[in-house]
Structures are given as structure tokens and as C-alpha cells.
Image (cartoon, helix red, strand yellow):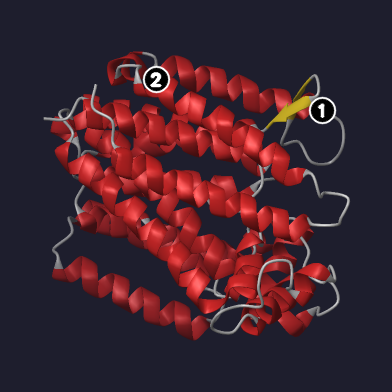
Amino acid sequence: MKFDFPLFLIALLLSIIGIVVIYSATYNTELSGLYLRQIAFLLVGIGVMFFLWRIPLRIHDGFAYVYYIAIIVLLSLTFLEGGRVHRWIRLGPVTVQPSEFSKLVMVFVLARWLRDRIREINSIITIVGAFALVIIPFVLVVKEPDLGTGIVFVVLVFVMLYAAGVRPLYLFLLLTPLLSMVSAVHWIAWAVYMALLLFIMIRWRVSPGLFAVVLVVAIFIGASTPYVWSRLHPYQRERIMVFLNPHHDPFGAGYQLIQSKIAIGSGGILGKGILKGTQTKLAFLPAKHSDFVFSVLGEQFGFVGAVVLLFLFYLLIKRILDISSSARTQYGSIVAMGIAGIIEFQVIINVAMTLGFAPITGIPLPFISAGGSSLITFWAMIGVLQNIHAQSE
């Protein structure tokens, strides 16, 4: 079977960079051995990749809905654990995070649903059905609480609908509730958005029935925004406020973002060097080995290091899109696009989060952030991509 060495080497290089940054971030702390665990997880992940490389994609196609039921059960089991946060399942000395594995499962499930209905891809049943499949996993992970993974699910649906051939106009109309909610923070912004929505629907001659439904939903969601805001967890509201103004709570919720910006800015062009970052070394930067690992890289390797990292992600996404375009089956092509969407979205949001361009959502940086479940899941995705490449024409 064919093996895509460029894909493997890029993912391996990203993982090695992650281990180096984690080592630097946790050096001489109580987590100083964390990089050794990350190395172990990398070896497991590579083993999973080789295993999935040999598993025909049709197996995942046939068992997609079985995977779906299994992951819902696993996500439900997290609530049996004690505490206020329910994200992990303990298996002896090891803890696993089912929400990370659920990302790949949902790729298989949505690809199966869309492939089976490819001739009616623009029908209401097909589109609504895709969102319906995500509802249960979305609710479970948000209640953990893990809003970041919930957002990944929603983005994944849009990416895979587009990959399957749904009209861009329909995708825009599907975004109406979210756009209406976001713009409703101020009545002028909401009025501008509603005017734009009306123009687009009239310009593209949306049918009267759909026109009425979209307009009613947009108005209802906009009016409901205060209620939705009141239902958010306090920490979620605080993250949004800090995103809009980090100095809203400089010694509380805003502290993390302020320190992240200082760390990245202090790195300059070439960085301060490994183990020499003051924000990292003096423990000013929280979550430096997980959500804010990009800040550590920016401080110690500077602008050049950050550009190199982002260029590697660009090469990875480009290679995945090439695999998608050359896939022998439509199912394989949609699966590859879904994987590309997950990786690209998490990279964009994580980096934007550390720079203050996106709210803090707890989305890890693929292959870089510490975490066994995340790293193994992304290597599993590489294994699936290897199989699609091996079966390509």
C-alpha cells in the first residue's frame, strides 16, 4: 500500500516541536516530566496511525453509526466522574478524553450521511439531518463543560456540507442565527446585518417560504440574545468580556490573555531562546503547556519560529486537500475535507485566541498542545488520510 511520507513527516515534525515547547514550558516545575508523557503518547499515536493506515475506509463507512452510538455512550460516562468538570474517563492510571475522539467519529458519521444522500444534497432533510446528528454530542460536550469542542462540531458540519456540494447560499442562510446573535450586541450592528440579509435573499431570489422562515428566525434569535447571554456559564460570559477588553479583569479572567500578549510580543524576531522566556520561566503565563503553548513558542522562538510553525500547518492542510481531491471515492474525499476543516479551524482559533483576536475557548493547538487524547486523535486522522491516499487513483 502507498504511504504518504510528506504527510507523515510534517505531522512528526509538528509533534516534535510540540514536545520541545512543552519541555521548555514545564522545565523545573512540578510538571517537568510532562514532555516524557507526550513522547509516549506520540509513540502510541504513530502506532494508531499505522493501524488505521491498513484499515480499509469502507470499514469506517459501514460502522459509522456504530461508532456514533459508542461515542455517545463514552461521552455520557464522563458524567459518572466526580467534580464540576466532566471531561475524562479514568482507566486505571490513564485518563482519556472522549470529546477528542468524538471529532473523528463525527467525520465518519457526517460523511456517511452526506454520501448516502448525495443526490439530494441540497434538500432540507439532508441539511437538517446533518445538524441533527451533531445535537446529542454537542449537548454532551458543552455540559462537560467543553464549549471549544462543541464549536468544532458546528464548524465541522458546515465544512462537510460544503465539501459534499451544498450551495454556498444555503450555508450562509444557515449561519443566520449565529450572525443575528452576534450582531445583536448593538442595535445598529443588528440593523446593518438585517439589511444585508434582506439584500442577499432578494438578490438571489430566495423562495418566499424560505425567505419568511429565515427572516423570522433572524428576528427571533436577535431578540433572544439577552436570554442566551444569561444562560451562559459565568466563566463563558467572562471570557467574552475579556475578549472584548482584556483589562476588564486584568488580575482575573483577563490575566491569561494579557500575559499571553506580553509573552509573544517580548519574543521579538528571533525569540529569547529555549528555557529563557521570562513570562514562561517565572510562571506568569497560565496553561502554558496546553491552551497557550503558542505563546511559549512565540516568546522563546520569536516571530520566525511562529512563522515556521504556521507554514508547517499550511503544508499539512495543503497535503490533506490534495488527498481529498485525489480520493477514489466520494466518501473518502468528504472525510479528508472534514479532517482538514478540524485541523485548520483549531489552528486558527488557538493562535487567534493567544493574540486576543478570538475568545478563549480552550481549543488545543493540533500536535503541539500537551494532551494524550488530542495527540492520539490527530495521529489517528493522519492514519485515515494515509489509507485514503493508499486507495487513491
- Badge 1: residue crowd in 10 Å (few <14, some 14–19, many ≥20): few
Residue 54 lies left or right of residue 334; in this view the side is: right
Which quadrant of the view contains residue 164? Answer: top left
User: Residue sitting at 74 percent across and 76 percent down?
Assistant: 259
Badge 2 element? helix
Which quadrant of the view contains residue 267? Answer: bottom right
**Image x and y of residue 228, in percent:** 63, 59
- State the residue position of label 1: 81
The answer, for residue 368, to whether it is visible in the render is no
Amino acid marked by disc 2:
Ala
- Residue 132's label in the rendered image is none
Along the line of sight, which residue is nearer the eye, 209 or 168? 168
Amino acid marked by disc 1:
Glu
The answer, for residue 42, to whether it is visible in the render is yes
Residue 215 lies left or right of residue 117; in this view the side is: right
Along the line of sight, which residue is nearer the eye, 79 or 104? 104
Q: Name the quadrant of the C terminus.
A: top left
**Image x and y of residue 319, in percent:** 28, 48
**Image x and y of residue 100, in percent:** 57, 37
Q: Name the quadrant of the N terminus.
A: top left
Q: Is residue 280 above or below residue 150?
A: below
Residue 76 lies left or right of residue 134; in this view the side is: right
Q: Is residue 37 above or below residue 329?
A: below
- State the residue position of label 2: 64
User: Residue sitting at 55 percent across and 79 percent down?
Assistant: 270
